Amino acid sequence: MFIVVFILTILILVIIHELGHFLVAKKFNIKVLEFGFGIPPRAWGKKIGETIWSLNWLPFGGFVRLLGEDESDPEVLDNRRSFAAQTVWKRISVVAAGVVMNLALAWVLFYIVLGVQGFKTRLPLLADYKFTGISQTVENVIVVGNIVPDSPAFKAGLKDGDRIIALNGNAVEKSDKFVEAVKADAGKEVVLTIADIAGNNKRDVVLVPRENPPAGQGALGVSLGGMQTVHLSFDSPIQKLLAAPIYSYNIIGYSGKILGDTIGYSFQKRDLGPVSNAVAGPVGITAVVGQILSVKNPLIPYLDFVAALSLNLAVVNVLPFPGLDGGRLLFLAIEGITRKKTHAVIEKYVHTIGLVVLLGLIVLITISDIRKLVF
């Protein structure tokens, strides 16, 4: 089921993205040769009108193939319905349309998610970052991990990732204070208030901390992780009106800060492990979908996840790398400034090389995802 949901998710994102290219190309009367899902070789195709609709064997992304795109035949390039024959601004509009559609989808879904939550949300604070245009407060969180079999925590039903809210009705935020309080009640029955990481689905569990636990296990038989979460609130009418763009801007900046810190740490330690753990491909995304669908009410978390994926797809695609929309936009921007087209053959080979590099990265990330799941 997780794989089916993942495939449908990717299909939605690809359709939205490529539909942007398709619709704007049609608006400018550019001939669309093929609308493909996945990367060739082709598994199936059917021609409807002048366009072939195809399914391809490599299930990563999709494409819209236009007449006169990546072509060197002068007759094709001069055809009035070819992509190459259009003004530079029309070509920029066609190329940018996919990114715009993904951004629009992200905004629509973020409005739904934030609106359902009363225009409030929270995130784990993994880097020092100041969120813009939004009210924020920081909260300390205690998270359970590495539960020892047959320990009091194990017998009480605690699970990795549970959040400790209170001890005997008293709120707790710092792990060292919590450990001291548990030791003070060793041998006595205590009540822990537990929730998921977001503070939802609260429940009380009763257990007795051990007075003389085995070495290294502690009174409860768990390890405790301290972390911070940031509570974001859209309070004013203008904040609510612009909630999705504001949130998207902050997510892009926050994610960039985390990735930048991770890359810097990896260089410092000369270890690619942290970067590998911070990046996920199709297999890793499937695992995340599985985790989301396993929660009690998965709809809103799932929509939030799809919105984040769509936003990520928009950002990645606009990067000025050959083979991506951003790479094509770079060539078009140079043409717009210099009034000179890059030779069609040169541009074709540049984008082909870029696509090969991207496919290689996908393979490497997929291997990394599989290793993380297995080990």
Image (cartoon, grey):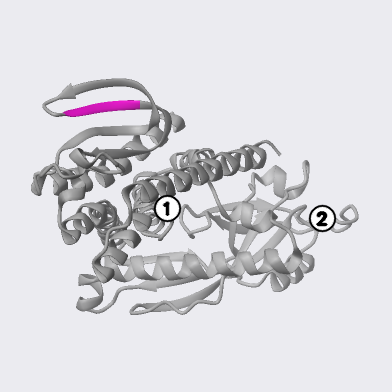
| Towards the viewer: 53 or 7 | 53
Magenta-colored span: 51-55
**Label 2 element class:** loop
**Structural distance between the alpha carbons of marks 2 and 1:** 61 Å
Q: Is residue 157 left or right of residue 18?
A: right
> Picture quarter containing residue 58?
top left
Taking depth in this image into account, of 260 and 372 the one nearest to the observer is: 260
User: On the rendered structure, is 120 left or right of 124?
Assistant: left
Residue 219 falls left or right of residue 91? right
Q: Is residue 72 visible?
A: yes
Q: Position of residue 259 (x, y in %)?
A: 55, 64
Camera sees residue 323: no
| Magenta stretch prevailing secondary structure | strand
Residue 39 image-quadrant placement: top left
Mark 1 lies on residue:
322
Q: Please tell me whether residue 219 is drawn above or below residue 353 in the rendered image.
A: below
Q: Viewer-nearest of labels 2 and 1?
A: 1
Looking at the picture, which amino acid does disc 2 mark?
Arg
Q: Secondary structure at mark 1?
A: loop
Outermost residue toward the front in this view: 74
Give the camera-side residue of 261 and 42: 42
Q: Report which residue position mark 2 lands on.
A: 210
- Quadrant the C terminus occupies: top right
**Residue 316 screen position, x and y as percent:** 41, 56
Magenta span has 150?
Answer: no
Residue displayed at 39% across by 70% down: 250
